[in-house]
Amino acid sequence: MRISGKTRVLGIIGAPVGHSLSPAMQNAAIEELGLDYVYVPFPVEPDFLGQAVEGLRRLGVWGFNVTIPHKSAIIPFLDRIAPEAELCGAVNTVCREGELLVGYNTDGIGFLASVREDLGHDPRGSSVLILGAGGAARGAVAALAGAGVACIVIANRTRERGVALVERCQSAFPGVRFVVSSLAEDELVEHLRGADLLVNTTSVGMNGTNFECLPLFALPPAGLVYDMVYVPAETPLLAEAKTRGLACANGTGMLAAQGEAAFSLWTGRQAPRSIMRQKLLAELER
Ligand code: ATR
């Protein structure tokens, strides 16, 4: 990789960013297409987010990803927010468009692409049970509602957050039936019985953690399970789904697909998918 005076700088801001797999994945794509770009990590603490965005703007940085904990907090510092990012209240990709910094959200696109590809499922007309009501859930709900699902049940530990998410989405998607649930077993059994797809958007499953009670037996035999967690590759939820013979996928495909969509936004080029996925899987194995 040759850096010159014309090299366009891309990057990622977050705290921490040291663990991010995006630099390896994006630089592999840049190298594959022989583009004059470079992608670097920028650790940014929450107190300095505004100054950091202003700095990136003044330094002429071409575009950047945004990760935890800045996805919502960055919105006031940007000039324009794309509709899908506005809807889920979170930005994961920023593009320079003329003098403006524009915020996008490619997490939802990535999630849908992964459901279609890794589970072979078109969500149109489906009933989906979402575990969680945070930022990741908002992205998934907006993407699924936009793709024409029939019903979305939001099951969250803190009920008010589920209610708030439904209120936010119901007016934007009047054709979708939204339901709020707790994580209590009897309620989950009832909702799982009618679900085509179960999606975990919470951090439960990372570091060997598991849900206290998730009655997976109630999901119909053709039901699908998607876990956004990708470390470990097989969470306890996915292990149980496999034992029960249910088709399932972890969040690796979503991580790759959101990165591919961001790459295309910045470069105007189709992302070299297999190279990006290979790099991602190699990094995950390390
Ligand atoms: P993200 O942007 O990754 O979604 P977040 O906005 O902090 O992160 O949301 C985390 C989600 O995981 C929330 O839905 C949270 O439930 P609460 O709203 O009750 O906090 C959920 N979550 C985290 N740890 C959990 C646990 N141990 N059991 C159940 N849900 C959990």
Image (cartoon, helix red, strand yellow):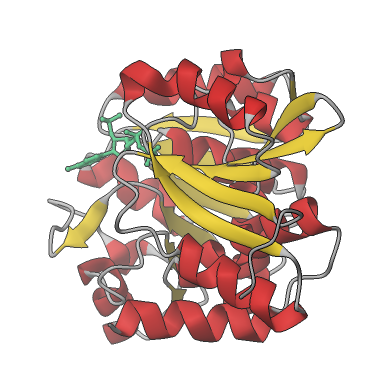
Residue at the spot 64% in from the left edge and 50% down from the top edge: 9
**For residue 162, what is the image quadrant?**
top left
* x, y percent for residue 59: 63, 33
Residue at the spot 35% in from the left edge and 67% down from the top edge: 230
* x, y percent for residue 166: 54, 24
Q: Nearer the viewer, residue 277 or 101?
A: 101
Q: Nearer the viewer, residue 201 or 198?
A: 201
* x, y percent for residue 61: 65, 40
* x, y percent for residue 183: 26, 40
Q: Quadrant of ligand 1?
A: top left
Position of 160 relative to 97 (above/below): above
Say left or right for 47 vs 197. Answer: left
Residue at the spot 42% in from the left edge and 70% down from the top edge: 250
Q: Nearer the viewer, residue 85 or 175?
A: 85
Say left or right for 103 vs 248. Answer: right
Position of 60 relative to 119 (above/below): above
Residue at the spot 72% in from the left edge and 28% down from the top edge: 101
**For residue 226, what is the image quadrant?**
bottom left
**For residue 217, what is the image quadrant?**
bottom left
Say left or right for 171 vs 164. Answer: right
Do we see residue 4 in this rendering? Answer: yes
Do we see residue 120 in this rendering? Answer: no
Picture quarter with the C terminus:
bottom left
